[in-house]
Amino acid sequence: MTTHADLLAILDAASYAVVALDLNCRVLYLNKSAKLFLHKRGRYVEDCIGCDGDQILPLATPKVRKALSTAEFKAGVGRIVDKGNQLFYEITPLMQDGKLAGAVVSLQRPERFEQMACNLETYQNLALRLQTIFDSSSDGIWVSDENGVVLDINNASEKLNGVNAATLRGQNVRTLLERGLIDDSVTMRVLQTKRQQTIIQNIKKTGRQLLVTGTPAFNDRGELYLVVANERDITDLNVLQENLEQARRAQEKVQRELEGLTMLEYERGGVVAESKSMRRVLMTCLKLAQLEATTLLLLGESGTGKGLLAKFIHKSGPRQTKPFISVNCAALPDSLFEAELFGYEKGAFTGALETGRVGLMELAGDGTLFLDEVGEVSPSGQAKLLKALDEREFLPLGSSKPRPLECNIIAATNRDLKAMTEAKKFREDLLYRLKTFTVSIPPLRERREDLFELVTLLLKQNNERYGTHKRITPRFLDTLQQYPFPGNVRELTGLIRQGVVMCDDVVLDDFLEDQIGSKAEQQDAEAATSLTAAVDAVEREMLIKARAVCHGTREMATYLGISQPTVVRKLRRHGIRPPRNAE
């Protein structure tokens, strides 16, 4: 049977401290562990039986008083667990004969709980899981204490920074910053502000760019005791963002061009572009119009619509509300070219207006000046035009003060300017000045896809103009596709207008087919005439050559491979005398 002494021995053998208090919170009992525990903390425990519990347990005793008044404790089921700065304590009711007689306070050191917890399998599993998460994170993680000393770095951070965690543990981030291992420290900022901070960090060693967020951790007393820095590699994100931005800009550019084409579809006044070649021309013109190219050269055969395209460029750019002045250089005599282009002052020359005259360049202002047939400008006019383009200013006749050239210049010609420069008929330096931006307009025979839209547009315009309802059939459209249209769009425009005005029938097929047929016959006749003339020229040249090396008509016949009478007849037809010793 267990005696009272045995029970006391059992309590003294317990590793944790036990203190019993009565209903008035006076000390009833302390076991050996309690005496040692309290003695080490400077508490007087000798002869404390019967003393007030506040003397040895100043934190727990007030809670005991409060607990003793509760129904749970009176029923023997209450329990309070709490902790002080240096210990944990548990308060349970002390029951005797089924009645509340006081309370038992059990005390334990915190490190003892930690040791016990560390030995628990659940704790070990939890620690393993946390370490696995720490090392498996794709984001880099730095953990530092309240002084900035590095406690740990995960595997991802080692790779991102090109460092070894073992060499950095225990080092202060201030030292790393001073040594240049990092260009900035989010941990330092968190320690200074005690708030979450985010920075962009460039790692020289690996060439990576990191988005680093530092977060402070506080204990239950509100003191900062840890800083956790999370690193995310944004190098690839920046590259992706740049690629996306480039794609976005390209998409916007295409969208603007498509919107521009759609918007101008009804404003371009006859510029049809169903063919790929003509669409490329329009896209180029739109780009040059938006870039405000100051000098532009349009090349193309007569009738391809160079003037129409010049107006299209003007209307497509930011100067669309400014003047558009067109001048046919071929219609200006050399003597009037400078006066018309640059203007003149009062009394500049005989016959000049009393008030002087504003030149076309000045009249264009900051709009567009279209120089059509620029290949017809005389050499002296070319020199003056080149000077104005180079210096971006011009001098009116009779004036000593130059005027600024503010307008854009669009020049056009159907001539081969390169061949003209080789023949010394066009200044090479002016050609290079004009051809900085060049647009070549394909002839109608090279863009058959535009024919249907052109015919439809021309019929619509002329029907509205003359109050008619003329049309053509698909069969005749096939005929038009075979016609070469040497006069290009201008010829087609005249043909459709002639049919709408002159034909009495609603369907223009037969009338237009007759017109095309007569044009084709005329062209064939002209071609045949040209061929005959070419053959005659070659024949005459060969006869003259044979006469120079042969001594008679028989020898000429053998030399040329024809009969002697034929030689005599051809010599007579070309008016060439036979050889001196002719037979």
Image (spheres, rainbow, N blue to C red):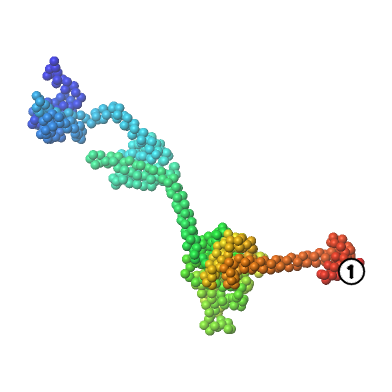
Q: Residue furthest top?
A: 1
Task: Tell me the crowding category of disc 1: few under 14, some 14 to 19, or many 20 or more residues within 10 angstroms, Cα based.
Answer: few
- Asked whether residue 23 appears in the rendered view, the answer is yes
Q: Is residue 58 left or right of residue 453?
A: left
Q: Is residue 127 left or right of residue 459?
A: left
- Asked whether residue 45 appears in the rendered view, the answer is no
Q: Residue at x 61, y 76 (%)?
A: 333
Q: Residue at x 37, y 42 (%)?
A: 231
Query: In the rendered view, would you say 262 is above or below 74?
Result: below
Which residue is nearer to you in this view: 19 or 357?
A: 357
The residue beneath circle 1 is: 580
Q: Residue at x 75, y 66 (%)?
A: 532
Q: Residue furthest front?
A: 505
- Amino acid bearing label 1: Arg
Q: Secondary structure at mark 1?
A: loop
Which quadrant is the N terminus positioned in? Answer: top left
Which residue is nearer to you in this view: 68 or 579?
A: 579
Residue 357: where, in percent of width, then height? 53, 79
Query: In the rendered view, would you say 437 is above or below 401?
Result: above
Which residue is nearer to you in this view: 436 or 258?
A: 258
Q: Is residue 474 left or right of residue 108?
A: right
**Residue 373, located in which quarter of the rendered image?**
bottom right
Residue 468: where, in percent of width, then height? 54, 70
Residue 101: where, in percent of width, then height? 9, 28
